[in-house]
Image (cartoon, helix red, strand yellow):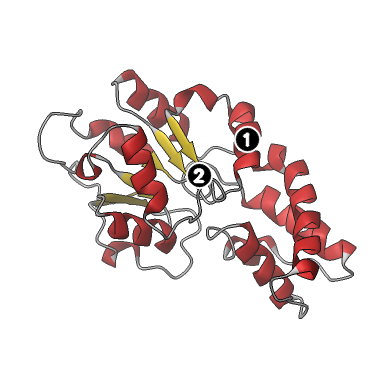
Amino acid sequence: MLFDLDGTLVDSAHGIAWAVNRTLAELGHPAADETLVRTWIGEGARFLLHRALRHAGADLPDGEAFDRVFALLMRHYAASLPRQARAYPGADAALRGLRERGVAVALCTNKPQRFIDPLLEALDWRALFDGIVGGDTLPECKPSALPLLHLARALDAPVEACLMVGDSHTDAAAAHAAGMPLVLVDYGYHREFDLHGAGAVAVTGDLRMLLQMPAPGAGALAVPTGAV
């Protein structure tokens, strides 16, 4: 099973909003409400910064000037990681339960690679993942299929035997592009995305539902009653 991180396993928006607002303050702009920042999460840190700057009326084209501001955001982002380490109810039990069943578990996130390990360490999750791909690990990130296909190969698993678990259109688009089954959570940062019209095999509010699915080799993917 491949998991998205922000909005699926952890509610990191409080910490991310803190980092965004520290960046905006240094640039002389007012803070953005956390509720608004939540709508900017999920497509990578550069997209996040573009949205924040656009909201402040100060967006920059990609280039040296943007990169300088991005470096500022990344400094505050690193300092915000303890504030991001908020696991959703059921996430820890689901990950540990899957491992106990012998299911290979991977992390497929658009969070920059260097920020993943400190966050996992804060949650005591580092040993739970057999593979990790961040937003800048490969030449392309979600919604490209590349991260999902890369992890499937690394786990030596056919794509159809994998499951992508996420919260947004970015996760859904990546899963569909890879030909991988999809489960969506009904919390997280899905914005106006139609979860129930996204072709997922299940939409759930509790990741522990995954523990009710058949173990690998048990046959076709089944969805527990009431999960959708």
Amino acid carrying label 2: it is Leu
Q: Which mark is residue 119?
A: 1
Residue 152 visible from this viewpoint: yes
Does 77 sit left or right of 88 as displayed? right
The residue sitting at the top extreme is: 100
Q: Secondary structure at mark 2?
A: loop
Residue at (50, 40) in percent of width and height: 88
Q: Identify the residue under disc 2.
A: 5
Q: Residues within 10 Å of mark 2 (few under 14, many from 20)?
A: many
Identify which residue, 186 or 157, lies in the foreground: 157
Residue at (86, 63) in percent of width and height: 25
Q: Which mark is residue 44?
A: none
From this view, report whether residue 68 is shown above or below residue 97: below
Q: Are marks 1 and 2 in contact (CB under 8 Å)?
A: yes
Q: CA distance from mark 1 to mark 2?
A: 10 Å
The residue sitting at the bottom extreme is: 57
From this view, report whether residue 127 is shown above or below residue 80: above
- Snapshot quadrant of residue 93: top left
Identify which residue, 140 or 166, lies in the foreground: 140
Identify which residue, 84 or 228, lies in the foreground: 84
Amino acid carrying label 1: it is Leu
Residue 89 visible from this viewpoint: no
Along the polypeptide, which appears first: circle 1 or circle 2?
A: 2
How many numbered marks have been drawn onto this rendered protein structure?
2
Expressed as whole percent of the image width and height from the top left, the position of residue 21 reads 78, 60
Expressed as whole percent of the image width and height from the top left, the position of residue 140 reads 48, 56
Q: Residues within 10 Å of mark 1 (few under 14, many from 20)?
A: many
Residue at (74, 67) in percent of width and height: 32
From this view, report whether residue 94 is shown above or below residue 26: above
Expressed as whole percent of the image width and height from the top left, the position of residue 48 reads 64, 63
Q: Which quarter of the rendering shows the N terminus?
A: top left
Expressed as whole percent of the image width and height from the top left, the position of residue 12 reads 61, 47
